[in-house]
Image: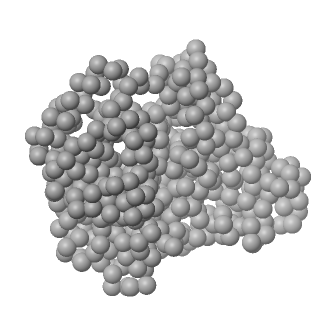
Amino acid sequence: MISTTAIAHLKEKLGDPNVLHEKEDLLTLGYDSTPGVHHLPEVVVYPQTAEQVIWAMEIAHREGLPLTPRGSGTGLSGGSVPVRGGMVIGLSRMNRILEIDEENLTATAEAGVVTLDLFNAVAEKDLFYPPDPGSQKISTLGGNVAENAGGLRGLKYGVTRDYVMQLKGVLPDRSLFCTGGKSVKDVAGYGFKDLMSGSEGTLGLITEVTVKLIPPPQDKRTILAYFDDIRTAGEAVSRIIAAKIIPSTMEIMDQATINCVEDYVKIGLPRRMAALLLIEVDGHPAPVAEEADGVRAILEQVKAAEIHVARDAAHAADLAAARRTALSALARVSSTTLLEDATVPRSRLAETFGEIERLTQKYGLKVGTFGHAGDGNLHPTVLCDERDHDEMKRAHDFYNELYEQVLAWGGTVSGEHGIGLAKKAYLARQIGEGGVQVMKRIKQAFDPEGILNPGKIFDEGDPCTVPHVEEGFRVSH
């Protein structure tokens, strides 16, 4: 247990409101957005400078406490759950946008800046920060980097790592690091900032991020297509990509998800359809018009049941907002929602939908599937009841068999949510024991004492790691 002397020192250095240690305060900080996984920390601190981060880490070192970094707690794989108790270092109060550099097209912000706040701030300067995770209204920039977050625009614009130019932070030995800079070209030494992006807080604490900005697209067209067969929707995606048309967004929802979303937002989605595709093309007006015509022609070729073009920008925004509610809408209809993050090569998309349908029938489950169809990133979501042990076993068997096929097709067990606690066993199946050992060596080089976010990404023989990691993760209510 952390000593009362250490608590006093933390309050002295960080301020009383920035140190939480009473159980009632700690209860809400023992989990992230991966319900069903909960471990209480001993203390939570909210530093507001890098120096305060170092002070907190120094006291944790003296007390023998492991450290778990935390942003807004929106992670979907248990990455910020303090499985060994110890100290949670919350970075959400380091939330200043430090600079928007219009000459170099960069923005520099502290780790706790909310993603959408950064997007809006640069948009006021007529600049564009593309990464848009589904939790962008509350997720933090540091958390996005730690998880290498994706988003709806990932198909055309890439993921968070593609925009990181410089990182500053603190290593487990309490030394400061700075990697990268504003130079567009920089190949000096190892790609440290790329390694830190997606390291899930296991190698260092990120305190400051500089990201690349780009000019905003001048025009956008939004197309909504409905299908009588979800595999036809998958074929449409493959054909659009094969035609060398890269939309900014190409999202899919199956019939179960369409009905749940329509119950939730009531925007007139047709309940009888097997699937829909929400497609946005953006850029300069002339290419946008040409690409929109090309998309429409392919949708007609595959015989989409209906094809609609958004009436105006407000209608397009409503459609995108409806897609962002998919998980919330599904979570309303069952006591437990098991969500996974299977990602396949886009040429395998239609086959993947067929496999999901086959396994849904084989295991007698109710499954809603949505996701980023354009980059092959799907979220097959089992609607179930964790009190029904037989149903839960069938759900886990469903995912195990699905991932066997996903990996056989050259897919990955996580396209954007990270590994954390929930996907450690799946990752081991994907990269093999040799791959896991390489990752452990990297971890050992950065964190020889194993104090930073322990128990994440791979097993360390720790009895405190979460059981049933192959069971996906729950959204319970």
**Residue placed furthest toward the top:** 103
| Residue at x 46% of width, y 33% of height | 130
The image shows residue 162 at horizontal and vertical percentages of 44, 33
| Residue at x 37% of width, y 76% of height | 384
From the viewer's perspective, is residue 172 above or below residue 43? Answer: above
The image shows residue 203 at horizontal and vertical percentages of 57, 47
| Residue at x 43% of width, y 80% of height | 386
Q: Which of the two residues, 437 or 224, is positioned nearer the viewer here?
A: 224
The image shows residue 147 at horizontal and vertical percentages of 50, 48
Can see residue 471?
no
From the viewer's perspective, is residue 119 above or below residue 226? Answer: above
From the viewer's perspective, is residue 98 above or below residue 330? Answer: above
Quadrant (top left/top right/bottom left/bottom right) for the N terminus: bottom right
Q: Which of the two residues, 36 or 89, is positioned nearer the viewer here?
A: 36
Can see residue 263?
yes
Q: Which of the two residues, 293 or 144, is positioned nearer the viewer here?
A: 293
